[in-house]
Image: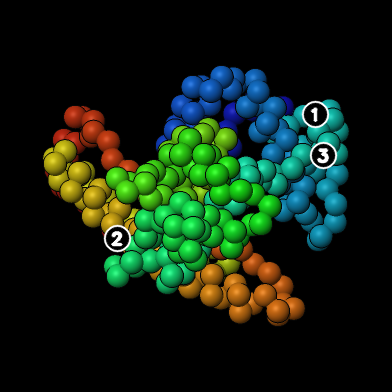
């Protein structure tokens, strides 16, 4: 059986349409970054074999090459070549992200660093200027091995922080999302998109308890209305992220001494808009949805 086989006639047409839609922005990204179809094909072979071998065992037994070929449609010679190679999806977290995430979590959740509206305070740069409530002390609270100057220079480069007119350090966003730095943004791209897709896949397959995954969609709006909704979504979304972040930090502190199994979690919010195709917008009924 070869990978060029035609699609199974039992496939859901609706699923095929959904997959085409989901893959479009990913393919656009790959083409813009020089990732070709042959490279993607090899990557897909690796992933099909890996996931089939891990998640589709028969009675818990290791799959044969023939079974994997039948399941995936990939030729057995490719399966023999690829299935025992070592590949890892372990997230390579850039240092700016690893340290920065901890700094931002502290800055956005510790009452000492928040103003009367629970927003991150502008911080004097040095301890000699602001004492405990300074950027230098914030960095020292998280790591004694890295100087605050190094962190600040990197944050300024990435667009995470800026100076106000009093030369205080200000957080540009209430959650750590670099404005610049491709490797840093790629980390969040992979992490966030994977977890969103994993939650949606779990809910579609119905294998485990459903995860919260909802959205609101409207398609008869003007550009001005879309802008207003974008601004409100940003405000309400950041309020939710800050609240979850604060609770998660407290719970993590309380969980530290316990010997139970560990879990990770992601809570994310996104907003997207684009012009509506004139042909698609000619509908008898509105297509507004809450899903």
Callout 1: SS: helix
Tag 3: Cα neighbours inside 10 Å, few (<14), some, or many (≥20)? few
Q: What is the secondary structure assignment of the residue under circle 2?
A: helix
Q: Position of residue 168 (x, y in %)?
A: 38, 50
Q: What element carries label 3?
A: loop
Q: x, y (%) of residue 5? A: 64, 28
Give the residue displayed 58% in from the left and 22% down from the top: 35
Taking the spot 53% from the left edge, 75% from the top edge, the residue there is 250
Real-space Cα distance between discs 1 and 3? 15 Å
Label annotation for residue 236 = 2
Q: Where is residue 3 in the image (x, y as percent from the top left)?
A: 68, 28
| Label disc, if present, on residue 159 of the rendered structure | none
Residue at 53% across / 32% down in the picture?
Answer: 182
Q: Earlier in the sequence, mark 2 or mark 3?
A: 3
Q: Which of marks 1 and 3 is nearer the N terminus?
A: 1
Q: Mark 1 highlights which residue?
A: 78
């Amino acid at each position: 059986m070869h990978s060029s086989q035609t699609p199974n006639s039992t496939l859901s047409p609706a699923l095929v349409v959904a997959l085409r839609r989901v893959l479009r922005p990913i393919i656009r990204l790959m083409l813009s970054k020089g990732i070709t179809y042959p490279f993607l094909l090899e990557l897909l072979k690796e992933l099909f074999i890996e996931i089939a071998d891990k998640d589709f065992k028969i009675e818990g037994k290791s799959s044969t090459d023939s079974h994997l070929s039948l399941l995936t449609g990939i030729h057995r010679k490719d399966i023999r070549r690829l299935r025992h190679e070592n590949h890892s999806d372990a997230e390579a977290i850039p240092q700016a992200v690893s340290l920065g995430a901890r700094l931002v979590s502290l800055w956005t959740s510790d009452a000492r660093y928040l103003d009367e509206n629970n927003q991150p305070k502008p911080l004097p740069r040095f301890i000699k200027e602001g004492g405990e409530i300074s950027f230098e002390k914030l960095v020292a609270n998280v790591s004694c091995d890295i100087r605050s100057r190094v962190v600040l220079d990197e944050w300024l480069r990435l667009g995470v922080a800026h100076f106000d007119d009093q030369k205080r350090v200000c957080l540009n966003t209430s959650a750590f999302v670099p404005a610049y730095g491709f490797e840093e943004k790629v980390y969040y791209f992979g992490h966030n998109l994977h977890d969103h897709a994993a939650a949606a896949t779990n809910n579609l397959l119905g294998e485990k308890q459903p995860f919260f995954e909802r959205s609101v969609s409207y398609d008869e709006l003007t550009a001005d209305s879309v802008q207003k909704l974008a601004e409100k979504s940003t405000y309400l979304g950041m309020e939710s992220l800050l609240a979850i972040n604060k609770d998660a930090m407290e719970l993590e502190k309380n969980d530290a001494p316990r010997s139970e199994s560990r879990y990770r979690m992601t809570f994310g919010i996104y907003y997207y808009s684009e012009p509506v195709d004139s042909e698609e917008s000619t509908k008898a009924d509105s297509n507004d949805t809450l899903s």
